[in-house]
Amino acid sequence: MDLELTEEQKLVQKSVREFAESEVRPLAKEHDETGRFPRALFQKAAQLGLTGVPFPEKEGGAGFDYVAYTIVIEEISRCCASTGVILSVQNSLYGDPIHRYGTEEQKEKFLLPYTRGEKVGCYALTEPQAGSNAAALQTRAVKKGDAYVLNGTKAWITCGGEADAAIVYVNTDPAKGEKGITAIVVEKGTPGFQVGKEEKKLGIHATACCELIFTDCAVPVANRIGNEGEGYKIALATLDGGRVGIAAQATGIAQGAFEAALKYSQERLAFGHPISQFQAIQFMLADMSTEIDAARLLNRKAAWKQDTGARFTMDAALAKLFASEMATRVAHKAIQIHGGNGYSREYPVERNYRDARITEIYEGTSEIQRLVISSWVLRS
Ligand code: CAA
């Protein structure tokens, strides 16, 4: 693994940072306050290839590697965490399983318009009673002729309220438990498919995070991704890439909070001096900087492993666990450096603090990451 970015990765970083500063940052506060899904911004991001970063050009993608993908998600999340996770879901949770397991016809229909940013996709695994224990999902699909008939409810689906299609994980053979889980693409407008309540959340307000409800919803068998019973493995393998994206999101949130705190500490006067001249503040800045760098290195290592084609489950879990808990610590310190102003909505660190917290929960809680890591440690 080469720690120096390639010329292409540096170019991606430069152009995405410019885009994030000029287009994403000015809207971040408004998106947080209104909860409006940034559809127009999503389409602008698509023009830069950000809705299909790691996919080949013939699949409508930008053809970059996964290290470049982490740079994209970090740079966007540095300015707006909602937009960061929306792009992460589009690339990793929705696009990746179709890229890896889809047929040519499925890629034509369910990948191309999505990598091009014409449509929004989402990933529907979680249910009201099945979060960490994803294998316990209750949504059922019964094959009738050339269709599957779906019944059940999915919960906490990022982009669910806006998505043009969802990859829905259902059980087609409950007697087989997790080996009965199957992945099926369901398009918006399919009779029996309805968006349920939108979640009112602590942070990442603009993600259209909703319930999805399926009532006798008939979907063509041709929409099945992989074989019947392969859905659980597809879901877990997809989450490896998703966790790399969330580690990048967390790193970006922390970087944004750190930069705001650094600037504030150089401008704010106390006892006749900028507060950056006090060791208490300097040590916080030092710790924040160290932790962000460590998280970024773990994140890039996981992405580099992903680029090699080797299994990167443990690397993704390490990166996500450290980066997410780090982001909460860094955002906490960023508020502390801002003092009372940090608690005000006038300053971005308050939003950073709320946004950071989810990265410890979605795409596998910190406890799930520790389970995954310890299972790999114990088998080696
Ligand atoms: N790649 C390929 N295959 C994999 C795999 C991977 N990464 N992970 C597991 N598998 C395979 C295993 O080899 C195994 O295959 P066999 O049956 O042939 O041996 C099979 O899949 C099952 O694997 P495990 O036995 O390891 O699975 P488990 O049931 O013990 O996993 C768990 C338990 C770790 C708790 C897992 O259920 C898990 O990660 N839960 C968390 C779910 C989660 O992260 N949900 C997030 C929802 S999505 C979200 O949050 C989106 C959003 O809003 C942004």
Image (tube, rainbow, N blue to C red):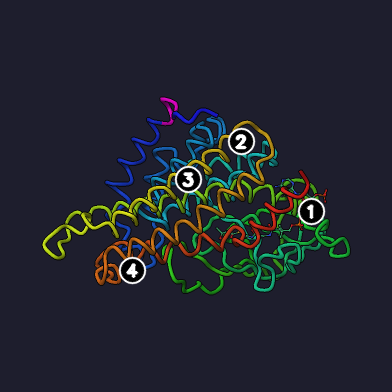
- Verify CB contact (< 8 Å) between mark 1 and mark 2: no
Q: Closer to the camera, 113 or 375?
A: 375
- Verify CB contact (< 8 Å) between mark 4 and mark 3: no
Depth-wise, is mark 4 or mark 3 nearer the camera?
3
Kindly report the distance in space between the C-alpha atoms of the residues bearing marks 3 and 1: 51 Å
Query: Which image quadrant for residue 215?
Result: bottom right
Residue at image coords 64%, 44%? 98
- Residue for badge 4: 33
Question: What numbered label is drawn on residue 305?
Answer: 2
Kindly report the distance in space between the C-alpha atoms of the residues bearing marks 4 and 1: 45 Å
Judged from the image, the secondary structure of the residue bearing numbered disc 4 is: helix
- Residue for badge 1: 146
Q: Closer to the camera, 153 or 236?
A: 236
Q: In the displayed structure, does residue 336 sit left or right of residue 366?
A: left
- Which residue type does callout 1 highlight? Asp
Residue 155 pos. (x, y %) = 60, 69
